[in-house]
Image (cartoon, rainbow, N blue to C red):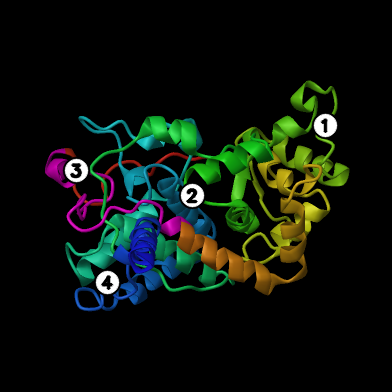
């Protein structure tokens, strides 16, 4: 009797482990070892070339990966443009202005020349995000492969699931929790704002009458506010660096900036300036030791990259990252189309 109960417990635990770790079990570092063994080298070379011509290329690529994974999982759906039967996620307010589709096109073209029809756009985003980080000074990690590309987009999901620069800490936590990520993941992944830019329209509400208080955002450093007001006097679409200290290097300065009220977005500063928040201690630990930040960022990127991937016979391997295969001949070949929206 005791043996039967123990076996039942073990079986239940094993089944639960399969459910929780299913995506990890289906993705693998060695997925392309036989079919596209030079994939990592090809993508890295393409990413380096993009960064050499556009210092913001890395930030654009990692943002695409973030916005992909938070809507229906990491399935390349963020890259799909409007087509018959498809309402693009690019039309969502959270994606208005997103850039980098032409960079993905170039990487995809390089990969297709190396191993045609083998590598998904979703896997290219995962690998390109890793390369974007370590090429600009950040940590490296082993990317897990095996994702397939979605044949559908989910604009409604993008409308509700993507984090907003205007949100409170509780709202941000809820959106991360909804995709299986925790508070450590929230603080770690927010550190991607250590490079890149944002347009003034996404933070200028902090300058005056913040949340109808009649005053500026009190968590925004007054000297920094004055500097930003000068930058934004050129217009709402003017860009400011996320990190005013080392804007093009992936380092821990995002967190040291938060400690002195120099988080660019409200959603950035919320991590440190929300009274009593459990995120404050994490920010302090990352600001103190870059190695701690890098370690947690690496793990959180792996966690995010494993959100609900399509695997096996699900989805497809798109020939053109902007089009599902059944429509690619009708709607344009590889690399055709607009350069995407333009927000950050």
In the rendered image, residue 147, in percent from the top left (x then y), is placed at: 29, 58
Residue occupying image coordinates x 26% and y 55%: 148
- Which residue is denoted by mark 3 in the rendering? 332
Stretch in magenta:
304-330
Q: Mark 2 and mark 3: span between their CA atoms?
A: 36 Å
- Asked whether the residues under the numbered discs 1 and 4 touch, taking CB atoms below 8 Å apart as contact, a structural biologist would say no
Please name the residue shown 65% across and 67% down the image: 293
Residue identified by numbered label 1: 216
Q: CA distance from mark 1 to mark 3?
A: 48 Å
Q: Are marks 3 and 4 in contact (CB under 8 Å)?
A: no
Please say whether residue 21 is one of the residues in the magenta stretch: no
Q: Which disc, if any, is residue 180?
A: 2
* Residue 181 shown left or right of residue 42 in the figure: right
Residue for point 73% across, 55% down: 244
Residue 137, placed above or below residue 262: below
Neighbour tally class for label 2: few under 14, some 14-19, many 20 plus, Cα within 10 Å: some
Few, some or many residues within 10 Å of mark 1 (<14, 14–19, 20+)? some
Disc 1 versus disc 2: nearer the observer: 2
Residue 110 shows in the view: yes
């Amino acid at each position: 009797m005791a043996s039967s109960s123990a076996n039942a417990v073990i079986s239940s635990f094993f089944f639960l482990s399969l459910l929780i770790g299913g995506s990890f079990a289906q993705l693998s570092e060695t997925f392309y070892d036989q079919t596209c063994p030079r994939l990592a080298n090809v993508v890295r070379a393409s990413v380096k070339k993009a960064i050499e011509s556009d210092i913001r290329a890395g930030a654009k690529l990692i943002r695409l990966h973030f916005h992909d994974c938070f809507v229906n999982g990491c399935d390349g759906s963020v890259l799909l443009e409007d087509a018959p039967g498809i309402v693009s996620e690019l039309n969502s307010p959270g994606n208005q202005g997103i850039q980098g589709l032409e960079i993905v096109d170039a990487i995809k073209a390089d990969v297709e020349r190396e191993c045609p029809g083998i590598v998904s756009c979703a896997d290219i985003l995962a690998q390109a995000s890793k390369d974007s980080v370590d090429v600009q000074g950040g940590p490296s990690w082993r990317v897990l492969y095996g994702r397939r590309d979605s044949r559908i987009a989910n604009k409604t999901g993008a409308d509700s699931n993507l984090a907003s620069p205007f949100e409170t800490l509780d709202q941000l936590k809820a959106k991360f929790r909804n995709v299986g990520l925790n508070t450590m993941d929230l603080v770690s992944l927010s550190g991607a704002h250590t490079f890149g830019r944002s347009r003034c329209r996404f933070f200028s509400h902090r300058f005056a009458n913040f949340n109808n208080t009649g005053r500026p955002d009190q968590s925004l450093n007054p000297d920094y506010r004055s500097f930003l007001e000068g930058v934004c006097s050129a217009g709402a679409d003017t860009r400011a660096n996320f990190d005013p200290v080392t804007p093009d290097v992936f380092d821990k300065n995002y967190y040291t900036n938060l400690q002195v009220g120099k988080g660019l977005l409200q959603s950035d500063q919320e991590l440190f300036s929300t009274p009593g928040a459990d995120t404050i201690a994490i920010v302090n630990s990352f600001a103190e030791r870059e190695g701690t930040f890098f370690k947690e960022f690496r793990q959180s990127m792996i966690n995010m990259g494993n959100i609900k991937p399509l695997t096996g016979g699900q989805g497809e391997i798109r020939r053109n990252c902007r089009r599902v295969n059944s429509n690619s001949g009708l709607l344009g070949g590889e690399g055709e189309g607009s350069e995407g929206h333009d927000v950050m």
